[in-house]
Amino acid sequence: MEEILTKELAEKLMAIKGEVRGFAVKQDGEYILKVKGEEGLEKVEKELGKIGFPIKYSEIKNMEFYPAGSRALSLLAIKKAFTSNDEEMRKVCAFQPKTPLIIKLFMKYFYSIPKIMKKSKTLWRTYWSIGKMNFVEYNEKGKYAILRIEDIDLHPVWCRCNEGYIASLAELVIGKKEIKCVETKCPSRGDRFHEFLLTYK
């Protein structure tokens, strides 16, 4: 069985150029605290300590920047600590758009998909110093949207995270429950960028 998180993988991820805002990582800890309690959070932090990159979620400052790779490390530590499947990893990131901080930061964009489309670059830059996100297509009649993320590649676990985050954000915007987000293109599969298909009923 392939090891989910190793020191070698951690070093590779942490060597990626670029940074991510602290709240993107800190909210992983908030989610685990909510669903697994203090003991669960300690379990995740222990996994990070084992590979030589200890993270104390309570010490992360929301608006400061941290190494981009720490985003994937946090998710991988959660996956390893609880042997989480893809759907469980989507739930970790589906939690984020509904937290008070994210609602406060982005509420003015939460009125329609077209409004978010116009501000997608601004939204992305709130999180990341690298990469870019664009809406490729939005079809209101067909009830779907296609998003593309370029110039950033962390780990497939982060892709599952994005599926959960995008679907959860769309739920807030369009007020529907039957929403799916699937990554249709990914650098880990040989594509030049990440592409996500969002559908709703």
Image: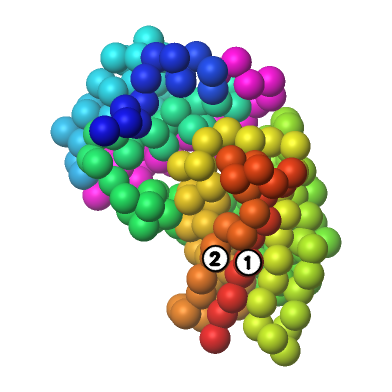
Q: Nearer the viewer, residue 127 or 103?
A: 127
Residue 99 is situated, as x and y percent measured from the top left of the image, at 47, 53
Tell me if residue 17 comes above or below residue 134 in the rendering.
above
Query: Local crowd at mark 1 within 10 Å, few (<14), some, or many (≥20)?
Result: many
Asked whether the viewer can see residue 177, the reply is: yes
Do labels 2 and 1 touch, CB within 8 Å?
yes
Q: Assign the magenta stretch its main secondary structure.
A: helix
Disc ID at residue 181: 2
**Viewed as shown, does residue 146 lie left or right of 55?**
right
Q: Which residues are magenta?
A: 14-35
Q: Residue 150 lies in magenta, yes or no?
A: no
Tell me if residue 92 comes above or below residue 55 in the rendering.
below
Q: How is the image coloured?
A: rainbow
Residue 199 position by quadrant:
bottom right
Query: Local crowd at mark 2 within 10 Å, few (<14), some, or many (≥20)?
Result: many
Disc 2 from disc 1: Cα separation: 6 Å
Q: Secondary structure at mark 2?
A: strand
Residue 14 position by quadrant:
top right
Disc ID at residue 197: 1
